[in-house]
Image (cartoon, helix red, strand yellow):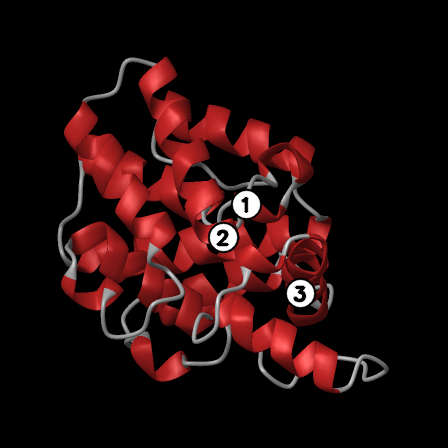
Amino acid sequence: MDVTFAGETGDLAYAYVREILHPAILNHSVRVWLLADHLGRQQDLKGKQREALAVACLFHDSGTAAPHDGAQRFEVEGADAARAFLSERGWPEGLGQQVWEAVALHTSPGIAERMGVLPRLVRLAVLADFGRTDLIGTEGRAELTEALERLPRLDVETALGDAVVAQALRNPEKAPPSSWPGGLLAAHLADSDRTGNPAF
């Protein structure tokens, strides 16, 4: 795969999540990085902050993977995993906190967008990958589209929704009411035979 992740730590983050994520969720996470980086470069995001963005994108759904299926919502488990990953590599606590917020808040509309550069970029990139193409400007769009098309979707909506619901069925506290996981769980319980979750 001809994608780089802004530095050695970003590349290590990709190597790690590649081993634990469902293939559809992995491709989605890389597409989110490409989209977030596209938006970030328009704001002159560079250096460690750009690499921190890569880590946040790669880890944003890591809470769906078995190694990070803890007691908290998948967003929080993924955020804890990302911060621990950076801490183990000697990254500054401040950047680790920014990454934590970006991962933990990526399903929180109206909040993530106001919590700083990284949470806003991850949130917008997630929205863009799930259809909000109006968020991406025309400059460099052809190259971005070509890169995204090299990462097939593999029915990520089903894979991600099913992963979140499976965790919530084992531990309903991971899907509190009014949260995105809670909405997915409620929709599943209302019609468990339906293919595809209408609350996605």
Quarter of the image that includes the N terminus = top right
Quarter of the image that includes the C terminus = bottom right
Q: Is residue 115 left or right of residue 183?
A: left
Residue found at x 34% / y 84%: 134
Q: CA distance from mark 3 to mark 1?
A: 15 Å
Label 2, secondary structure: give it.
loop
Percent coordinates x, y for residue 137 in the rendering: 28, 76
Indicate the amino acid at tag 1.
Gly
Q: Which residue is mark 2?
A: 73
Residue found at x 54% / y 66%: 181
Label 3, secondary structure: give it.
helix
Percent coordinates x, y for residue 62 in the rendering: 54, 43
Q: How would you rate the neighbour count of disc 2 (Cα within 10 Å): few for under 14, some for 14-19, many for 20 or more?
A: many
Pointer 2 with pointer 3, Cβ within 8 A? no
Q: Which residue is mark 1?
A: 63
Q: Is residue 72 left or right of residue 93?
A: right
**In terms of depth relative to the viewer, which is nearer, 69 or 36?**
69
Percent coordinates x, y for residue 38 in the rendering: 31, 58
Q: Which residue is mark 3?
A: 156
**Residue 51 sits in quarter:** top left
Residue found at x 57% / y 28%: 16
Q: CA distance from mark 2 to mark 1?
A: 8 Å
Pointer 2 with pointer 1, Cβ within 8 A? yes
Indicate the amino acid at tag 3.
Val
Nearer-N-terminus badge (2/1) = 1
Q: How would you rate the neighbour count of disc 3 (Cα within 10 Å): few for under 14, some for 14-19, many for 20 or more?
A: some
